[in-house]
Image: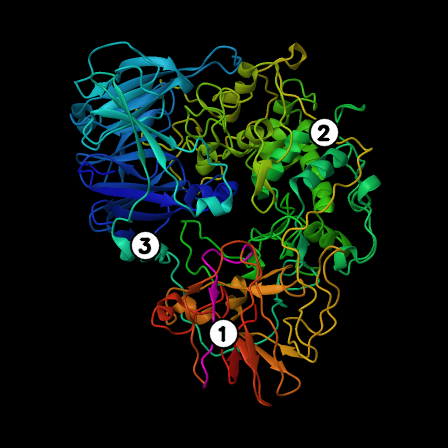
Amino acid sequence: MTESGKHAAVAYAPRTFTNKPEMMSRGAFTAVVDLETGRITKLPFQATLGYFSPGCGRGEDAVFTALTDDTAKSPESRLVTVAAATGKVKSKVTVAGQVTSAIPVRGGLAAARGNHIVKVTGGKVREVATTKATPFQLKADADGGVTFIDRVPQRAKARAGGQEAATVSRVPERDLQKASGNAQPTALARGNLTGFDLTATPSGEVYITGKAASTTSRAGGMVHNPGGLAKGALVSSHGQAAVTSRWADGKDSRIRPEEALTQRTVRTTLKTIDTGKTAVLDATPGDLIGGAKSARAGNETSPVLTAQSASTATQASGPVDDDRYCSVPRGDAKKQAFQPTPRQIEWAVDQAVVGKLNKGATRGANWKNTGMAAYAPQSLFPLTPLKGGSGVDWHVPAQVMLGVTAQESNMWQAARTVVPGVTGNALIGNYYGIKYSADGYQKDPWAINFAEADCGYGITQVTDGMRMHGKEKKDEHPKTTVQQEAVALDYAANIAAGVNILIGKWNDTRDDGMTINGGDPRYIENWFYALWTYNSGYHPKSTAGSNSGKWGVGWTNNPANPLWKENRTPFLENASGGDDYSHASHPQDWPYQEKVIGWAARPISAMFGPGDFQAGYRASWWTNVQERTQAKPPIGLFCDATNNCDPSSATDGASNETGKGPCMLPVDPDTHNPLYLKCWYTKPAAWKKCDNAECGNAVHRFDDTYPEQPDANSYPPRCNTGLPAGSLIVDDLPNGTTPAGSSNRCSGVSSQGSFTFDFASPSARIDLHQLGAGNGNHFWFSHTRSKIGHDDGARLYTKGPRRPRRPGSDLGRTSRSAGCAAPGPARRARRAEGSGTRCDAEALPEAPTCTTVGYLTFTARSRLRWRPCHADRARARQPRRIPGMALAGRGTTAPARA
């Protein structure tokens, strides 16, 4: 929030962006919001998802930071200053090195670079003061100074038994303006690193929340430590009260999707800072500030995603992308992925980690009507031996692998619109090759570049070998067709492949002598290196020659990287050791491996069926709460001289050289230096003694006497139309096709006509989806666009003509399951007599029921055309969707029968 309190700066993105280093570093969308009028101005650039961006301070400006990662060739930080009142970019500077926590101050920006407070003016970086570690939570105070938190580094060999400490420190305005590099910050308070935080009023009154003991009174009157304020509390605009909020219904963020669309009462506790008295207020969301205009602005496409012009001429073809690079396609009714229940996933993980999966999950030919050949999951992917030992307990802990499934996919094998027991398109990472440039700009969100496709499939996002044969990346070894289809469509095979990937990371690091806490695989923490590399890759010792002599685990996921907030508690845990699932709403504060261990300790809330959410699996366990808390290692454990990482080096002197810590590479300002951010750690590490019962343990819920757990049967299809004798049906699949699905679903469809697609451009397929539900166990759906004349609307326009084979017949029922389609109320579409079209706004029930649309009588040349409607035109009583489609064509309609 800016100094006036009238404007807010925002960075936002899907949570899955945090799983990709390049998206985490520079993929967030940006906007400014007028808090009085509700006006939203989306900005034409992207920024980091790091906790520190955007930054506000003095005046009405906000600064957004974008970073490169250790895969980039140029070591740069881009700082974009925006006038929050207008959304206009005032300055854009690119500086060498990793600059974090930038905020506006008089005459420029204050920021952190390594273990220094720096001043950035006109692209020039000058050091202000040297700190003990990387300073964070920079706050501009009303006296013109900057207050921050500074971690007190532990020695690399220090164990977690001793709490890490931090200080609240301040540099005054005179030192910021002078920027001589020799300022001495004043320490104002000290406490446990994870025990306190900073917050501030828009006008610059800084408050310490949580527990920290004041060490001096020399704070200039602008830094307050009243005590008794919960860590993370916010302070009211005028500094009169500390504010904490929770849901009045007592629930946390683990709610059903339909609940997310309803109003929830917020219970806010106000604690007056002067008197310590409290008041509790309940508030229900009212009208949106700015009304419908603000809502529409919020839904507009970011200007970063400037779509290129596209022809509106239709391109008649099927829903499958024949020119794709990923092996198993979207849009093929026979190649739909089956969505398992969380219980099935936990069973499969328990079997796979001990090599017993084939006993209960051998697949016959045409498993679930997918047309696949017969196979057994762990015959396709035999369990890779785990190096370093042997024995019945020498295997991946189930909760580590389950944590991977939670973080990678929310335990989804199929797309996110598919519920357990239902089929749909496989969950595929960047199937269309949507590309982000190194500077974070995405030129066109609908531009297809199949050569850049990620092709990560299913629950564990298996990527390697999943491209079509002949379209592999350099040095990529393709999987067989059976392996590829099994990974994409069958959760058990996907888990078998994912377990081997994780074991491969364990083996790679262990081969190079890298172990955690002695390397016993039974314990949760000891998979820290394997999880680190599961996400961001590993640089083996054998490749050091091509990496300027460097090898090891990468810098992005290093806990010492300033990208991560240093006073973070363990993922999903609050400062008192209790649950805090709100962390899942801002996962960008934790490196990947800490998130997975957090999921191992606290299971994801997963859907077992529509409206039925439970813990997705059994949690791992520790002997006490403190040991569970200390599953997160000390911040500086993987940062020492051996990987050119020294967050406490305070004797290097003032300089504008890059690499002033924590990562000290490179040591010259050449932005193309091959050593950039290659602070790759190479040593064994330890912070616990597992033999002393300090480490986390797995829970193996299902032994091999348990059979494969039963399928769910969510949204059972309607296999018998119930139409009068002689009625003809034109289905959305060719006659005789049996769509993928469980054996208790429908057999082959009966269709007396044809249904095809006309796409305005190949990009239109991106927003075409399918589900194994409804009439005949299959339907297609799409989404509305805000403006039919908009470039996105034009290029994504899709028509689906149906043509019956015999004239003068009732078409039959068209139905949908309201709980399976896109968000928003279902609508009943009715066609008036004549050649025009019309959509009514009669709301249908929100419950997951099938609703009859009506009957349409055809003449010899009749056809029924499905097409997406557009919200703007619908308001003018023109075509409106049955979410995804609308009726058009010649003929007359009859009301739906009861």
Q: Residue at x 79, y 35 (%)?
A: 706
Q: How crowded is mark 1: few (under 14 residues within 10 Å), some or many (20 or more)?
A: many
Residue 888 appears left or right of 83: right
Disc nearer the start of the sequence (1/2): 2
Q: Which span is picked out in magenta?
A: 819-834
**Which residue occupies the foreground of this view, 891 or 157?**
891
Element class at badge 3: helix
Give the labeled residue for mark 2.
Answer: 701
Q: Name the residue type under label 3.
A: Ala
Q: Name the residue type under label 1.
A: Ala
Disc nearer the start of the sequence (3/2): 3
Can the viewer see residue 841 in this picture? yes
x, y percent for residue 675: 49, 36
Label 1 and label 2: CA atoms lie apart by 51 Å
Give the labeled residue for mark 3.
Answer: 295
What main secondary structure does the magenta stretch of the protein show? loop
Element class at badge 2: loop
Disc nearer the start of the sequence (1/3): 3
Label 1 and label 3: CA atoms lie apart by 28 Å
Element class at badge 1: loop
Give the labeled residue for mark 1.
Answer: 760
Instruction: Choose mark 1 or mark 3, whichever is in front.
Output: 3
Q: Residue 630 carries which label?
A: none
Label 3 and label 2: CA atoms lie apart by 47 Å
**Which residue occupies the foreground of this view, 36 or 162?**
36
Q: Name the residue type under label 2.
A: Arg
Q: How crowded is mark 2: few (under 14 residues within 10 Å), some or many (20 or more)?
A: some
Quarter of the image where the N terminus is located = top left
x, y percent for residue 567: 41, 23
x, y percent for residue 403: 61, 34
